[in-house]
Image (cartoon, rainbow, N blue to C red):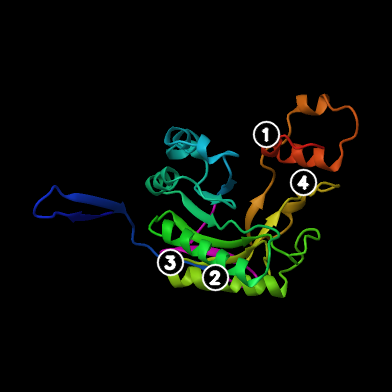
Amino acid sequence: MKRVLELVPSHASGLTVSTTFAVRTVELRRSADETRFFLNGKPLYLRGATYWPDLYLSNMSRVRYEREHPSGDARGYQRIRVHVHTEDPEFYELCDRLGIALIQDNDLNWVFPTDVGFTARAVRHFGALVEQLRNHPSIIAWVAMNEVGDLNGVGMPQGLSPEGHRIGAQLVSRARQLDPTRPVIQNSIDKDDLASGDEHDYRGSLMGGKTTYFDIFADKSKLVTEFGVDAPPALTSLRVVPRPLNACERFCLAWPSFTIINIVC
């Protein structure tokens, strides 16, 4: 549906502004055993991927968005997680039109300051993001933080720290104040925290070691919002590096988009 606002002063030509909207309900039911989306009261099966199409947003365009997200069965997915960034308006308009369900991330990721000033700015920023995008029916949930642990930069998160809970609660509260119609995931990765409820599974890829994708089959996962790798390194790249790779080089091969910025290893 489309809402139209038209202003017509008596002495000049009119100004018309229109926006697309939809009427539907979205729930995220979270328990100790499962995390599941419901759309209009019916379970929503999510088949999709996280999305980070380019290192520079200025490289994106409507044409490229339409090429990467075709209509119909050729697409093969119906859900996208916009991972730790915001896309151009053309992307959200396209997803509205194609019926692609979006989980929209905030920018807070891994480690950040915990002082009062930074927290206030973070809450304002998240609020501005929600206000900017909340009219897009394609968005079914917000993510306040991603993979935040002890906020001391020590390894991967093993559970949210008290400081993380404090900041996360403020972010969630602000999002719900501005948009009470959508669920909010406080910290994406905390599957056992009912304020979050999703998980990331990198067995067989970034977790390395002796893990394989087959390890996942025997498990009953909850809501998996990160899985696999962005793109495996090309075989030609591996062949030109005969010596053992250092930690920085392994990171660059696992995350190819970072090699564009000339990381010195």
Q: Which residue is mark 4?
A: 204
Residue 32 visible, this angle: no
Q: In this rendering, would 100 be left or right of 11?
A: right
Q: Residues within 10 Å of mark 2 (few under 14, many from 20)?
A: many
Give, as a three-letter code, the residue at label 1: Ile
Task: Mark 1 or mark 2: name the one nearer the start of the chain.
Answer: 2
Residue 218 shows which numbered tag?
none
**Residue 259's x, y, as percent?**
71, 35
Ranked by sequence position, the earlier of labels 4 and 3 is: 3
Locate the N terminus by quadrant.
bottom left
Q: Which residue is mark 3?
A: 41
How far apart marks 1 and 3 lie (CA) works out to 44 Å
Q: Nearer the viewer, residue 218 or 207?
A: 207
Q: Position of residue 113 (x, y in %)?
A: 68, 64
Residue linked to disc 2:
172
Q: Residue at x 58, y 44 (%)?
A: 52
Observer-nearest residue: 77 or 102?
Answer: 102
- Indicate left or right for 154 with 128 as reference: right
Q: Which residues are magenta?
A: 30-46
What is the C-alpha distance between the residues marked 1 and 2?
34 Å
- Count residues near mark 4 (Cα–Cα under 10 Å), then give few for <14, some for 14-19, many for 20+: some
For the residues labelled 4 and 3, the Cα–Cα distance comes to 35 Å
Q: Is residue 200 above or below residue 238?
A: below
The answer to whether residue 9 is visible is yes
Residue 184, position as x, y percentages in the image: 53, 66
